[in-house]
């Protein structure tokens, strides 16, 4: 499902215009982003939990040359599905 498909679905499901649904989705995504930056996690009970994890620096290899290289540490976003979401897709 694309973002536009989700906006179309939200508009129909909530009986609102596509423009309103688009603004609502953008606001929700911005809220998730802010929650991850400020708190490190965002939880939707039954749906799942977004969290920020730190990936440690490590050594890797350039696949083209085989040369070893250092891969720097970085923060990555992870998602763990909740029970209701898991059950709904099985």
Image (tube, rainbow, N blue to C red):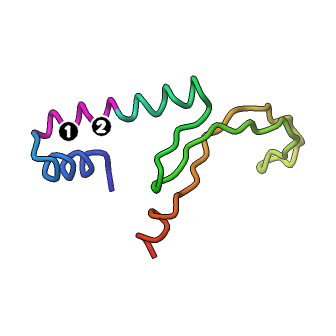
Q: In the rendered view, tell whether residue 76 sits above or below residue 84.
A: above
Q: In the rendered view, tell whether residue 71 sits above or below residue 60.
A: above
What type of secondary structure mainly makes up the magenta span? helix
- Check disc 1: other Cα within 10 Å, few if <14, some if 14-19, many if 20+: many
Question: How far apart are the alpha carbons under marks 1 and 2?
Answer: 6 Å
Bounds of the magenta span? 17-27
Residue extending furthest front?
Answer: 45
Q: Position of residue 47 (x, y in %)?
A: 45, 54
Tag count: 2
Q: Which residue sits at x=24%, y=52%?
A: 5
CB contact under 8 Å: marks 1 and 2: yes
24 inside magenta stretch? yes
Q: Which residue sits at x=61%, y=40%?
A: 51
| Position of the N terminus by quadrant | bottom left
Task: State the image quarter where residue 39 is shown.
Answer: top right
Residue extending furthest bottom?
Answer: 90
Task: State the image quarter where residue 26 is shown.
Answer: top left
Q: Which residue sits at x=84%, y=35%?
A: 57
Q: Is residue 50 left or right of residue 28?
A: right
Q: Which residue sits at x=10%, y=39%?
A: 17
Q: Position of residue 52 (x, y in %)?
A: 64, 37
User: Disc 2 designates what residue?
Assistant: 25
Question: For residue 39, which numbered disc appears in the image?
Answer: none
Q: Which residue occupies the foreground of this view, 6 or 60?
A: 6
Question: For residue 21, which numbered disc appears in the image?
Answer: 1
Task: State the image quarter where residue 29 is shown.
Answer: top left
Q: Secondary structure at mark 1?
A: helix
Q: Which residue occupies the foreground of this view, 43 or 34?
A: 43
Q: Position of residue 33 (x, y in %)?
A: 48, 30
């Amino acid at each position: 499902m694309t973002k536009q498909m989700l906006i179309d679905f939200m508009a129909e499901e909530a009986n609102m215009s596509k423009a309103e649904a688009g603004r609502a989705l953008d606001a929700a995504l911005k809220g998730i982003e802010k929650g991850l930056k400020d708190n490190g996690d965002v939880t939707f009970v039954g749906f799942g939990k977004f969290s920020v994890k730190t990936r440690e620096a490590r050594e890797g290899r350039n696949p083209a040359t085989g040369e070893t290289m250092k891969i720097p540490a970085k923060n990555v976003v992870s998602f763990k599905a909740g029970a209701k979401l898991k059950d709904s897709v099985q």
